[in-house]
């Protein structure tokens, strides 16, 4: 059993954020420790409020965990502001374990969760520390500064610009099949193709993917195999979660 540190926001409906990271890592047979960056009031319909954890408390959480527990990988989710980003960057710069960043810029319901200053901070300071960054298509376009239509190979552009591997999630694209593209720093590209499942219970898919990759990297899998295993878990979670009736909006996955 490996220990994975997840640094993310709290979701009151437990479909995303820290709560979903805990479930994901546990479902893969590993142990998760947590650092909360923000408290959110949210449900399956939307986000009603966000409160950023003060920087000194964020640092205290990081110090508390890392002074006591040996972590084998780190997953980073919601970072609400630049000050939080700087605390995380400085702390993680002293670690030598796989780091997976899910740059959560918008919630599933469309609420902005990351400030422009924070986006600049993670691009400059956090991405160079990461093993993998897992944006969706809109986030990829934001990070690249171009649209997929204007520049067909945004993935290669991101790898060259930030010096780390990118797994671009294809869920926002149209069509009966979904394709995620893994662009690695060694120049290789892998595609992960799966049929689109008709359901609105998709809350927390990005959190699940990134924390699953972190857990699988922690147990020693290479990046391609970790991404493949994470995709298989996502597909399982969507299939098992499509019949759930939790809340009035976008329900969660079910991994167990």
Image (spheres, rainbow, N blue to C red):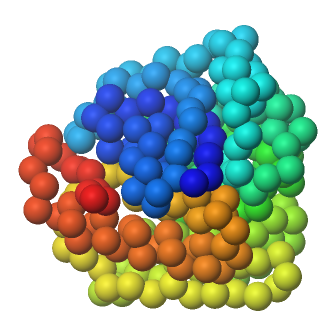
Pinpoint residue 186: horizontal percent, then vertical percent: 85, 82
Q: In the image, what residue occupies the spot 82% across and 32% down?
A: 91
Give the position of the C terminus as an image quadrant.
bottom left
Q: Residue furthest front?
A: 1
| Residue 153 left/right relative to 26 | right
Depth order, front residue of 248/154 = 248
**One can see residue 157 in this view:** no
**Quarter holding residue 199:** bottom left
Give the position of the N terminus as an image quadrant.
bottom right
Q: In the image, what residue occupies the spot 87% across and 65% down?
A: 163
Q: In the image, what residue occupies the spot 9% across and 50% down?
A: 245
Q: In the image, what residue occupies the spot 86% across and 32% down?
A: 90
So how many labels did they put on this image?
A: 0
Pinpoint residue 121: horizontal percent, then vertical percent: 79, 38
Q: In the image, is residue 17 above or below residue 25?
A: above
Depth order, front residue of 30/119 = 30
Depth order, front residue of 47/208 = 208
Pinpoint residue 136: horizontal percent, then vertical percent: 53, 63
| Residue 130 left/right relative to 232 | right
**One can see residue 96 in this view:** yes
Pinpoint residue 58: horizontal percent, then vertical percent: 67, 20
């Amino acid at each position: 059993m490996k220990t994975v540190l997840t640094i993310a926001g709290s979701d009151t409906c437990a479909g995303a954020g820290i709560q979903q990271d805990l479930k994901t890592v546990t479902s893969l047979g590993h142990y998760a420790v947590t650092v909360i960056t923000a408290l959110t009031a949210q449900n399956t319909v939307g986000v009603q409020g966000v409160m950023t954890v003060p920087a000194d408390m964020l640092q205290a959480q990081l110090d508390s965990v890392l002074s006591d527990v040996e972590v084998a990988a780190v997953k980073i989710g919601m970072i609400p502001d630049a000050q939080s980003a700087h605390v995380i960057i400085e702390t993680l710069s002293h670690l030598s374990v796989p780091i997976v960043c899910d740059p959560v810029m918008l919630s599933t319901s469309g609420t902005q969760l990351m400030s422009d200053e924070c986006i600049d901070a993670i691009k400059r300071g956090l991405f160079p520390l990461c093993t993998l960054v897992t944006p969706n298509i809109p986030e990829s376009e934001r990070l690249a500064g171009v649209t997929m239509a204007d520049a067909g190979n945004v993935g290669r552009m991101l790898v060259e610009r930030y010096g780390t591997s990118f797994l671009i999630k294809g869920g926002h694209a149209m069509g009966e099949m979904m394709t995620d593209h893994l662009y690695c720093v060694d120049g290789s590209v892998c595609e992960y193709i799966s049929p689109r499942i008709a359901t609105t219970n998709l809350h927390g898919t990005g959190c699940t993917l990134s924390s699953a990759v972190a857990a699988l990297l922690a147990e020693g899998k290479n990046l391609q195999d970790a991404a493949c295993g994470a995709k298989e878990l996502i597909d399982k979670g969507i299939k098992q979660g499509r019949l759930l009736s939790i809340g009035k909006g976008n329900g969660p996955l079910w991994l167990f």
